[in-house]
Image: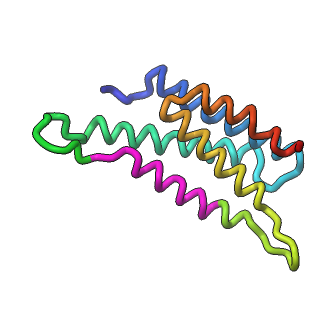
Amino acid sequence: MDFDLSGAILAKLVLAAVLGGLIGLEREIHGRPAGFRTHLMVSLGSCLFVLTSIHFYWSFGNFSGQGPVGIDPARVAAQVVTGIGFLGAGAIIRDKASIRGLTTAACLWVAAALGMAAGAGMYATATTVTAIGPSAFFS
């Protein structure tokens, strides 16, 4: 399977960037620290990690039927979740009795998930989450 920049891969990358950017735009309009560019890059980077993982699976997996495939593409996705957790932790600030940045951290986490979903080809799911996500800020 050829994973050079085909139309399908380009569509996944563009969708991840657009959806992450939409969430970031909403955050930027409301004056939050992580805005359009941050969310776009988190979503795009997550998509690239998933695409790379799928590429590794098809390029280096043992599909001869003589043993286990030997490569688990879900491992990269799991590490994206861990990395984004670390990034989100940096966005959380304790200011005396209050804590700020939890929503920003959650938005970065969702942007990463959007990129992962787009990279895995889950277009409708990623688009639906993008539509639902900002509504949480208005409740």
Instruction: Examine the rendered structure and indicate whether residue 59 appears above or below residue 88.
Output: above
* Magenta stretch holds residue 83: yes
Residue 17 in picture, x, y percent from top left: 63, 35
Tell me: 22 left or right of 124. right
* Magenta stretch holds residue 54: no
Residue at 80%, 40% in the rendered image = 134
Residue at 80%, 56% in the rendered image = 33
Residue 126 in picture, x, y percent from top left: 62, 33
The quarter of the rendered structure image containing the N terminus is top left
Residue at 47%, 45% in the rendered image = 49
Count of numbered circles in the view: 0
Residue 32 in picture, x, y percent from top left: 84, 53
The magenta segment: 71-87
Tell me: 138 left or right of 13. right
Residue 72 in picture, x, y percent from top left: 33, 47
Q: Quadrant of residue 24?
A: top right
